[in-house]
Image (cartoon, grey):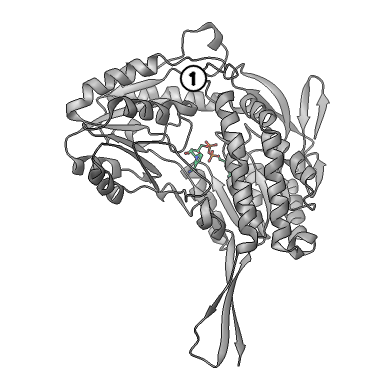
Amino acid sequence: MTSHAGELPRLDMYIGGEWVKPASGEYFETVDPFTARPWAMVARGGAADADRAIQAAHKAFKEGPWGKMHPSERGKLIYRLGQLIEEHADALAEIEVRDNGRLLAEMQHQIRYIPKWFYYYAGLADKIEGVVHPCDKPALSFSRPEPLGVCVGIVPWNAPLLLLSLKAAPALAAGNTIVMKPAEYTSATALKLMELVEAAGFPPGVINVVTGFGKEAGEPLVTHPLTRHLGFTGSTATGAYLYSLAAKDVKRASLELGGKSPNIVFSDADIDNAVRGVVGGIFGAVGQTCIAGSRLLVQRGIHDQFVEKLAAFSKSARIGNPRDITTQIGPIANRMQYDKVLGYIDIARQEGAELVLGGKRPDIAECAEGFFIEPTIFTGVNNEMRIAREEVFGPVLSTIIFDEMEEAVEIANDSEFGLAAGVWTANMRQALRMSEMLEAGSVWVNTYRDISYTTPFGGYKKSGIGRENGVEGIREYLQTKAVWLST
Ligand code: NAD
């Protein structure tokens, strides 16, 4: 729900089926990364609002019609929400672009794909079955999966609606209720989604959105005694901290965290295809994806030729207004991230990496105000450097040379992260061997950044716990009850 204060629209929260002003009465600016100017004021939620939302979700779960509804009826509502997202995809894409600066064409594509999560999990809602166990006692023993109760979904700013949908669709299909907190920089699509939730006819309290800053609005959702599950996507540091809070109350948590993913190019690869894949992997979304292929491992024999082609291809990318359909590289999503990425470019230089492309703001009139950084490529990187170990979350590629397959695996796995990896080779035996040896939740061969609602996604090591998507995704939101009947 939007009201206007002076020039800027004010965005309220959605709690218990109502549009709610923050208890503090305060709003904060949300900024368009292309113009670097605020375009709306967002409700600054706090502990009182978080409590109100969790109570509403708890009531909807325990007393409302949701808990008593047949799963197929819940499935129908979830399906209807998917249809409404499809119908409003263009409007949602425009809001997302205004909030996080992603390319309009890319966001239209992404948001048109989001309904598939709702359709898939709507279909699963009435297929959650129990098991009768062979029993060595005079009893009938069976078990059935049950919902957990109130779930909390907290997400970052790089793909707000997609990341919320990955949590909401399976949580609801499993019969839970949910309170979501989008990132403070990108709250608007979550709130637009709540208009669609209302239109779909969800009972009050089943889906709620609290907006605001992590510590103020997010943390009280996690620590609330009625919260049963935390679904978190964000940085490893925040995820680990929230996991420790959840652990205090033995709450369940699924964590989708950071990455430093290697893209490994063998000398027998289709070079042009690999160049396109590597560029899409690191410069798509201006490098602001958890799966960004930020470490490029190239076999020695093709290194110079590969880097030359890569630099030429990246240099030709059109940087500018994300709303222009011909633009290939837009701005960084917010000023803090912009400063962080430039900081890492300085660190790489100080560490002795060689800059072969970019490394600064583009000298383009259209980019004078927004948070723009050129596609940046470093060579001469070794895996000990900070630029090879820490997540930059920006358009910065570090190139490392390897000789043999075993060495590539050793370098690739020498990371605290394990979210994804890319392998580029014409040799399928080599590709399969690599897929066995790489410590990563997703391995792509001759492709990169593919995700689907059907295929489990998640991290090894410090990249996360649990899986989203597919049947595994809904299991995160269920618990098993065993029942014994004496016979
Ligand atoms: P972040 O951890 O700073 O913030 C993520 C969310 O957590 C935001 O909504 C923020 O408000 C909230 N938050 C922060 N502190 C909190 C606290 N104390 N209590 C409760 N909530 C809190 O991450 P970011 O910088 O916004 O996002 C970038 C990170 O997200 C990167 O590390 C990236 O790899 C990761 N990411 C992971 C995936 C994945 O699926 N693995 C997908 C996208 C992004």
Image spot of residue 291 (x, y percent): 43, 38
Q: Nearer the viewer, residue 138 or 286?
A: 138
Kindly identify the residue that appears in the image at 59 percent across and 27 percent down.
Answer: 100
Up/down of 218 relative to 396, above or below = below
Instruction: Answer above or below: position of 58 versus 369.
Output: below
Q: Position of residue 300 (x, y in %)?
A: 18, 29
Q: Residue at x 57, y 61 (%)?
A: 251
Residue 228 visible in the current orientation: no
Task: Check the image and name the residue furthest to the top.
Answer: 365
Q: Name which residue type carries label 1.
A: Gln
Measured as percent of width and height from the top left, residue 146 is found at: 63, 67
- Give the total of numbered labels: 1
**Distance from mark 1 CB to nearest ligand 1 atom below 8 Å:** no
- Front residue of 91/126: it is 126
Residue 36 picture quarter: top right
Tell me residue 260's x, y (percent): 38, 38
* Image-quadrant location for residue 107: top right
Q: On the rendered image, what quadrant is the C terminus found in?
A: bottom right
Q: Locate residue 2 relative to residue 31 in the image: left or right.
A: right
Most foreground residue, 43 or 457: 457
171 sits to left or right of 400 = right
What residue sits 74% from the left and 53% below the top? 206
Camera sees residue 221: yes
Residue at 29 percent across and 45 percent down: it is 413
Asked whether 141 or 378 is in front, the reply is: 141
Q: Quadrant of the N terminus?
A: top right
- Judged from the image, the quadrant occupied by ligand 1 is top right
Circle 1 Cα neighbour tier, 10 Å, few/some/many (<14 / 14–19 / ≥20): many
Residue at disc 1, secondary structure: loop
Please name the residue that numbered disc 1 is placed on. Answer: 328
